[in-house]
Structures are given as C-alpha cells and as structure tokens.
Amino acid sequence: MSSDAVKTSILVVDDTPENLRLVSALLMDDYKVRVATNGPQALELAAQSPSPALILLDIMMPEMDGYEVCARLKQDPATADIPVIFLTARTEAEDERRGFELGAVDYVGKPINPLILVARVHTHVALKRSRDQLAQQNAWLEQEVQKRTRQVQRIQDVTIIAMASLAETRDNETGNHILRTQRYVRALARHLQRNPKYAGALDELTIELLYKSAPLHDIGKVGIPDHILLKPGKLDDAEFEIMKTHTTLGLEAIRRAEQHLEGEDGFLRIAGEIAHAHQEKWDGSGYPLGLAGEAIPLSARLMAVADVYDALISKRVYKPAFSHEQAVAIILDGSGKHFDPELIAAFREIEDEFRAIARQFQDHE
C-alpha cells in the first residue's frame, strides 16, 4: 500500500458527516482523502498546494451550493483544471445538464453505490494524470521548439554577418554603413507599415528579415576586381559595366548559400531581392534588369532609399560628405524618377529618424 506522502489527493465536499465517512472509507486505501463541509472551505482547500487530483462535490449544501462552488473553481486558473464529480440525489436531466455546463466531468447519484463511485474516481484520476503528463510533454516540446527557433535565428544571423563581413573586406565603405542602412530600412518599413497598402506585406517577421538582409545589399562586390572597386576616381564606361555586375554576382552568391540551408524556408529570399535589385530605379533607368515601378521588389525599393541617403551623407574618395539637408533635398528630387514616390513620402515624414541613426552610428576617422 502506498504511503500518504505519495498518494494522489482527493477532496470530498459534503455537509453530511455520514456521507464524508462513507466516501473516505471507500477511497482511503488508494487515495489521500481531504474533506470539506461547506463551499468556502472547499474553495480554500482546493487552492492549496498540492492541488487535489479530483473533487467530489455535493450539490445541496447551505450558504453556497455545489453549483456555485463548481463555477468558482472553474473561474480560478489555479483550480480550473481540477475535475469535479457531483455527488447528489438530484439526478434529473436538467440538473445534470446544468452541472456539465458548469464544467463537471461526471455525476454519481445518491445513495452512493460503492463500486460505481470507486470505478469512476479511478477513471477520472487516471484521465487527469494523463492530461497532466500530456501538458508537461507539450510544455517540453514548446520549449524545444523555441530553442530550435532561437538556434535557427542564430544561424541566420551568423550567416548574414559572415557574408557581410566578407564584403566589407573588399569595399572601402565602413562597417557603420551596414549598421546605418539596415536601421534606415527598418525605420522606413515600420513607418510604411501604417499605410494599409503595405500593412500586409510588411508584417513584423518581414521587417525583421529586411533588417537582417540589408547588410548583404553589396555582397556581390566581392567579385569586382580591385582596380575597379577601389578606384579613387570616376569609373569609365567599361569599368562601370563591370561594376554593375555586382548585383547579379550578389544574387548568385546568396542563391548558392540557400542551397546549403535546407528547411530554412528561404530566409535569404529577401536578401537576394535586395542584392539584385537595389540599383533599379522607379523610372526604369536602373540596373541590372531595367525594372520600373512596382516591378521592383519592395525590399529593393526600401534599400535604394537607405543606400542612397547613406552614400550622400558619407565621405568617399570621390566626394565629400553632404549634409542631411542636402541629402534629403536630393532624395526628394528623385521621387518618381529614382525612387518610389510613396516611399519618399514616408521618408520625408521620418527624415529626423534617419538623421538620428546617422549620428548614432557615424563614422570616426
């Protein structure tokens, strides 16, 4: 026989001492039986730890009847999962219907049939134990899913950082350019999210992927020869044609990386769009495909604004740094030509946020 320390606990609630003695005698060999003689006492005992695995509840009690006790048990998150069996002489269909609606799992009529009572208690205690085990297993599985999700996110982050760092080693732009542009993209996307036209396309997951992908916009420059990539002066036509291939080279590099990330649901898709199309222009005069208007992926249109703004405010070997005001004026002038007019309207509303990002991550000589 099991000791009380390891027995499953059952709470019996009845205002009649004879009923309490009978039920306790029937169950005490297999369970630790606690008793309550009224509703308030039952609620107090049910809330104590450890919670009872089952409550046997009389309906007809003074002050607070069993229906009200059951309702309060189900309203309290601490006791809502405890199964309740009504013990009652009220066995009309309407009485049972009301009890089940309140959340009871079973009815045992009075006078009590010992065999039926013990059998139903065993059944519902076993069901409760199975539910608890399933809930624990589900909680463990949820933790494992969250752990796996965090691992996937870290893999994504490390993949992008590694690829972006490779590009940095070849380019004369600084790491802060990457930090700034990804924050510009995120700020612009979040503001554009308020526009009903873009709310569906710019959910939080997509904005997070935009933020992660932005550093890869110039990954293709790793394939551009040094004498062109690092040339201090203006490129001639032939050199510029070679420079333009960095968009296609970037897309190809990202697609090769995707082939080794089975099951990641193409998280680099947005990175590929940005790398390939961020040099396209709204009026169709960009490269590499000469796309125009909304044929240009939204991710690339966002990146174009961020990249150009940062290039304008940054010092390069071929140009001085422009002021924020100068950069804004140039970008506004490019609305409908270089840039999507709706994005430029959003940019105009948050230009101060761009300025704050630029100051926070400014380059230091």
Image (cartoon, rainbow, N blue to C red):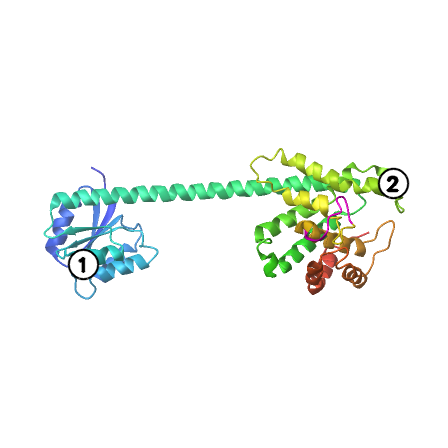
Is residue 120 in the magenta section?
Answer: no
C-alpha separation, residue under disc 1 versus residue under disc 2: 90 Å
Q: Residue at 55% x, 43% y: name it.
A: 150
Q: Label 1, on which residue?
A: 94
Q: Label 2, on which residue?
A: 238
What secondary structure is marked by label 2? helix
- 159 vs 220, nearest the viewer: 220
Looking at numbered disc 2 in the image, what kind of residue is underneath it? Answer: Ala
Residue at the extreme bottom: 63
Looking at numbered disc 1 in the image, what kind of residue is underneath it? Answer: Glu
Q: Which residues are magenta?
A: 286-294
Q: Looking at the picture, how far across and down is residue 67, in whole percent? A: 22, 60
- 133 vs 271, nearest the viewer: 271
Which class describes the residues within 10 Å of circle 2: few (<14), some (14-19), or many (20+)? few
Numbered circle sitting on residue 236: none
Q: Is residue 144 above or below residue 75?
A: above
